[in-house]
C-alpha cells in the first residue's frame, strides 16, 4: 500500500511538471519575454550568448535562452520538441529535403509577409528553408557551404602555374605536376560522400547546372540522359591525376597530403578551410572553380553551394510576436556580420563581407554563378537518397567495375522508386 | 510439493531476467517485422511485406546477395586462417610446457581489445598514405607489393579476415589447448610404441579425438561470422545505404542491418531491419542446430 501511495505521489509530481512546461518560453509580470532558441551547435554556445546579448541591447524586453543539443541527436529531438509542450520558440532548421516532414506536419510558421527582412536574401538562399509543396519560406537562412578546388600557391609559383582558365590548361597543369612527382588532386575515395561533390565541382557545367535541375525536377530530363552520363564520366578523365591509392584514402588523409605539400590541389568544402590551416598554419592557399570540360552546356565555371541552416518559428510558440522580432533581426547586416566574424561562417545576408578573403571569394562566386549540390538539394527527401546512389555508383566507376552509364542507370532506378516529377 | 515450489522460486530470478532481456526482445523483433512503420510509429499490418521488401527494394535487393556470400567467405576464411593456425599453435604449445602460460596470454591479449579499437589501429597501420606497412615495403625494395590494402577490392576482404584472425586467434588456442590437455596420453604413447611418427600420431590419433572441440569451434565461429560487424565497420566505415568497402567488397549482412536500421533514414527502417534480423536469426539458428546434431551423431 505504501508503495502504491509512493507511485501516486510520483505520478502527481510528473503531471505537475508537465503542466509547468506547457508554456514554451516564459514571461514575467513586466511583459518581458524569454525566448527559447534551439540549435545543434553546442560548440558555438559561448559565441551565441554574446550574439544574443547584442540583440537584448536593442530589444530590452526580450531575453534569449540558447539551448544547444548534440548535432547527431538533434533531428528527432526537434521533431518531438515541436509537437509537444516545452519545445523551442525559435529553432535552428536543417535544409531542403530533411526539413520537409516538419513543414508538412504544420509544426512551423511560414515567414513570407511576416519577416520583411527576407528580401535581404537571394532566391537561391531561400530555397534551403522553402516548402517543396507550398513554396513558402519557413526559415531565415543562417549560413551556407560551398565546394571548390583549393590550390597551394607556393607549389603553383614553383612550377609557374596559374589557376587554369581552360580545361586543356587544367589537364596540362596536372600532367606537369605529375611529372614532377606531385599529386595534382588530393581526392579521397574511402569517404564516398565526397565523390558526388567532386563530380559537381568538376562537371556541373557539363550537365548544365541549374537548367538541368529544373528539367529533371519537371520530368523533362533523366539521369540517364547523355549530358548527365558524360558529367559522371568527367571524373574518369581526371582519375590519372588523383592519388594512385585513392580508394584507400579518407578525407583526413587527403587533407594531410595537400596541407603537407604532397599534393598541389584539393577539391574541398568551405568547411575545410579551418582544418587545412590547422594541419599547416603556413599554407599559402588560393581557390578556384574548374573551367568547363569539353562539351559542357555551361561555358563559365560554376560555384557549388548549398544552404546549411536557417532559423524558423515554432507554430506552438506562445510568443509569436517576439519570436518574429528575433527572426527579423537575424535578417539584418548586424546579425550577418556577427555570423561571419564571430561564428566564422558564410553568412547569406546580402552585402555582408566574410571574415576570410577566401570565404569571401567563395560566397561572391556563389552569388554570381551558383549551382546546387543536386543530390542534397533536391533528392534527399526519400530513400534511397540520391547522394548515396551517386556515391556508390561513382566509386564503382572509378574502380573500373562499371561505366558511367551503369552508374547513371542505378541513380535513375533508385530515385524513380520515390521521386515523382 | 513445498519442495517443488521452493525450486521454482529459486528458478524465478533467472527466468525473469532471461525473459525480460532475451525472450522479449527476440519476440518483439519478430512482431515488429510484420508491421509497417513510420519512424517509431506503428502503422498497418504488413504481413510478409517487409520480408519481400528486402528483396524488391532497390538498391537493397542488389546488396543482400553479395553481402551473404561475403559473410560466407568470411566464415570459411576464418576457419582456414584463424582456427587452423590456432590448432597448430595449441599443438605446439603442448610441446613447450615452459613457455605455455606466457604465450597463451600473449595470443589472447588482442582478444581483450574491442573490435572498434582493433579496426582503427589496423586502418592506421594499413593506410596507404601514412601507414608503416607500405612504408616498410618501399624501404625493403618491395614497393611493387604496396597497395591500398583496404581500398583494393581484391585485398579488402582477405585483409579483414586476417585482422579478425589476428584478434581472435587466442580463442581457438584456448579451446584446443584445453581439449588437448584433456586427452589421455595413453593413446599417443600406444601409437608411438607401435611405431607411428609424429605426423601419423597427430592425424590418426589426436585429430579424431579433437573432433568434438573442432565442432564447437566451428559452430561458434559460424555464429560469430554471421553477426560480424564492428571490425568491418571500423576498418571500412558505413555510409548511408551504400555497400561498405571498395565497390562494396567487404559488405556483410551485419552491416546491411546497421545501415537499414540506423543510417539510411527510410521511414520503414524498423520494419525492414526487423525482418532482416529475423531472417538472420532463423538462418544462423537453423544451421547451428543442424550442425550441432551432425557433430553429436559423429562423436557419440
Image (cartoon, rainbow, N blue to C red):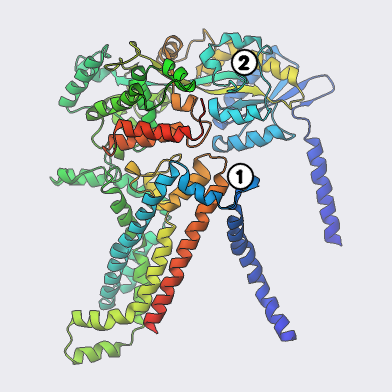
Residue B287 located left or right of residue A381: left
Q: Are marks 2 and 1 in contact (CB under 8 Å)?
A: no
Question: Residue B201, relative to residue B78: is it above or below?
Answer: below
Q: Residue at x 53, y 31 (%)?
A: A381
Q: Quadrant of residue B180?
A: bottom left
Which SS class for mark 2? loop
Q: Which mark is residue A50?
A: none
Question: Residue A3, relative to residue A301: is it above or below?
Answer: below
Which SS class for mark 1? strand
Dot 2: chain letter: A
Total numbered circles: 2
Residue picked out by circle 1: B37
Q: Residues within 10 Å of mark 1 (few under 14, many from 20)?
A: many
Q: Residue at x 62, y 24 (%)?
A: A49
Residue B261 in the image, given as x and y percentages of width and height: 52, 46
Residue B131 located left or right of residue B138: right
Residue A183 in the image, given as x and y percentages of width and height: 23, 28
For this orientation, the residue located farthest to the front is A220
Residue A76 in the image, given as x and y percentages of width and height: 61, 37
Residue picked out by circle 2: A330
* Residue nearest the viewer, comparing A101 with B196: A101
Q: Are marks 2 and 1 on the same chain?
A: no
Residue A115 located left or right of residue A95: right
Instruction: From the image, state whether disc 2 or disc 1 is nearer to you.
Output: 1
Question: Residue B44, relative to residue B282: is it above or below?
Answer: above
Separation of disc 2 and disc 1 at Cα?
38 Å
Q: Quadrant of residue A291?
A: top left
Q: Quadrant of residue A34?
A: top right
Q: Residue at x 85, y 22 (%)?
A: A29
Q: Quadrant of the N terminus of chain A?
A: bottom right
Residue A159 in the image, given as x and y percentages of width and height: 19, 17
Amino acid at each position: 500500500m505504501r508503495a502504491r501511495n509512493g507511485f501516486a505521489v510520483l505520478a502527481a509530481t510528473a503531471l505537475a511538471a508537465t503542466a509547468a512546461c506547457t508554456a514554451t518560453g516564459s514571461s514575467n509580470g513586466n511583459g518581458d519575454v524569454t525566448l527559447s532558441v534551439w540549435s545543434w551547435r553546442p560548440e558555438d554556445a559561448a559565441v551565441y550568448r554574446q550574439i544574443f546579448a547584442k540583440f537584448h541591447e536593442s530589444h530590452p524586453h526580450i531575453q534569449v535562452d540558447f539551448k544547444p543539443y548534440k548535432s547527431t541527436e538533434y533531428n528527432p529531438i526537434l521533431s518531438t520538441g515541436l509537437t509537444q509542450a516545452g519545445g523551442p520558440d525559435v529553432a535552428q532548421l536543417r535544409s531542403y529535403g530533411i526539413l520537409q516532414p516538419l513543414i508538412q506536419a504544420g509544426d512551423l510558421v511560414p515567414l513570407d509577409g511576416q519577416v520583411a527582412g527576407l528580401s535581404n536574401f537571394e532566391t537561391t538562399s531561400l530555397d534551403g528553408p522553402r516548402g517543396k509543396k507550398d513554396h513558402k519560406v519557413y526559415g531565415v537562412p543562417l549560413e551556407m557551404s560551398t565546394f571548390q578546388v583549393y590550390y597551394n600557391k607556393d607549389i603553383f609559383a614553383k612550377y609557374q602555374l596559374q589557376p587554369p582558365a581552360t580545361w586543356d590548361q587544367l589537364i596540362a597543369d596536372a600532367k606537369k605536376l605529375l611529372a614532377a612527382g606531385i599529386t595534382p588532386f588530393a581526392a579521397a575515395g574511402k569517404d564516398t560522400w565526397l565523390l558526388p561533390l567532386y563530380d559537381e565541382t568538376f562537371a556541373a557545367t557539363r550537365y548544365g547546372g541549374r537548367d538541368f535541375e529544373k528539367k529533371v525536377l519537371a520530368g523533362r530530363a533523366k539521369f540517364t540522359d547523355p549530358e548527365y552520363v558524360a558529367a559522371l564520366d568527367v571524373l574518369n578523365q581526371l582519375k590519372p591525376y588523383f592519388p594512385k591509392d585513392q580508394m584507400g584514402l579518407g578525407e583526413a588523409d587527403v587533407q594531410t597530403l595537400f596541407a603537407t605539400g604532397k599534393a598541389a590541389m584539393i577539391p574541398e568544402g568551405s568547411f575545410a578551410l579551418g582544418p587545412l590551416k590547422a594541419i599547416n598554419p603556413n599554407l599559402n592557399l588560393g581557390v578556384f572553380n574548374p573551367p568547363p570540360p569539353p562539351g559542357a552546356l555551361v561555358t563559365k565555371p560554376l560555384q557549388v553551394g548549398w544552404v546549411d541552416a536557417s532559423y524558423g518559428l515554432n507554430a506552438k510558440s506562445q510568443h509569436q510576436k517576439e519570436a518574429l522580432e528575433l527572426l527579423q533581426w537575424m535578417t539584418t547586416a548586424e546579425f550577418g556580420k556577427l555570423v561571419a566574424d564571430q561564428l566564422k561562417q558564410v553568412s547569406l545576408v546580402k552585402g555582408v563581407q566574410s571574415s576570410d578573403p577566401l570565404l569571401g571569394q567563395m560566397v561572391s562566386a556563389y552569388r554570381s554563378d551558383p549551382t546546387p549540390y543536386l543530390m542534397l538539394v533536391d533528392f534527399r527527401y526519400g530513400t534511397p537518397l540520391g547522394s548515396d546512389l551517386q556515391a556508390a555508383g561513382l566509386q564503382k566507376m572509378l574502380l573500373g567495375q562499371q561505366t558511367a552509364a551503369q552508374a547513371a542507370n542505378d541513380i535513375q532506378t533508385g530515385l524513380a522508386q520515390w521521386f515523382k516529377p | 510439493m513445498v519442495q517443488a515450489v521452493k525450486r521454482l522460486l529459486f528458478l524465478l530470478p533467472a527466468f525473469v531476467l532471461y525473459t525480460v532481456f532475451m525472450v522479449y526482445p527476440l519476440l518483439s523483433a519478430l512482431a515488429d517485422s510484420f508491421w509497417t512503420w513510420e519512424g517509431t510509429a506503428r502503422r498497418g499490418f504488413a504481413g510478409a511485406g517487409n520480408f519481400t521488401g528486402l528483396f524488391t527494394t532497390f538498391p537493397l535487393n542488389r546488396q543482400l546477395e553479395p553481402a551473404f556470400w561475403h559473410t560466407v567467405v568470411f566464415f570459411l576464411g576464418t576457419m582456414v586462417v584463424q582456427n587452423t593456425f590456432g590448432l597448430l599453435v595449441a599443438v605446439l604449445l603442448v610441446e613447450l610446457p615452459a613457455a605455455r602460460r606466457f604465450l597463451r596470454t600473449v595470443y589472447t591479449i588482442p582478444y581483450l581489445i574491442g573490435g572498434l579499437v582493433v579496426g582503427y589501429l589496423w586502418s592506421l597501420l594499413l593506410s596507404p598514405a601514412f601507414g608503416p606497412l607500405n612504408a616498410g615495403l618501399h624501404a625493403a625494395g618491395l614497393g611493387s607489393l604496396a597497395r591500398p590494402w583496404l581500398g583494393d577490392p581484391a585485398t579488402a576482404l582477405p585483409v579483414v579476415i586476417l585482422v579478425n584472425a589476428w584478434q581472435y586467434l587466442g580463442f581457438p588456442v584456448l579451446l584446443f589447448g584445453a581439449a588437448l590437455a584433456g586427452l589421455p596420453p595413453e593413446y599417443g604413447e600406444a601409437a608411438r610404441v607401435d611405431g607411428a611418427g609424429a605426423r601419423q600420431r597427430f592425424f590418426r590419433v589426436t585429430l579424431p579425438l579433437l573432433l568434438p572441440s573442432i565442432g564447437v569451434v566451428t559452430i561458434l565461429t559460424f555464429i560469430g561470422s554471421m553477426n560480424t560487424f564492428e571490425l568491418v565497420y571500423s576498418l571500412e566505415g558505413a555510409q548511408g545505404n551504400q555497400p561498405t568497402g571498395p565497390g562494396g567488397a567487404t559488405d556483410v549482412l551485419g552491416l546491411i542491418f546497421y545501415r537499414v536500421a540506423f543510417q539510411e533514414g527510410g521511414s520503414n527502417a524498423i520494419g525492414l531491419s526487423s525482418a532482416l534480423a529475423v531472417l538472420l536469426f532463423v538462418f544462423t539458428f537453423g544451421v547451428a542446430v543442424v550442425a550441432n546434431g551432425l557433430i553429436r551423431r559423429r562423436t557419440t
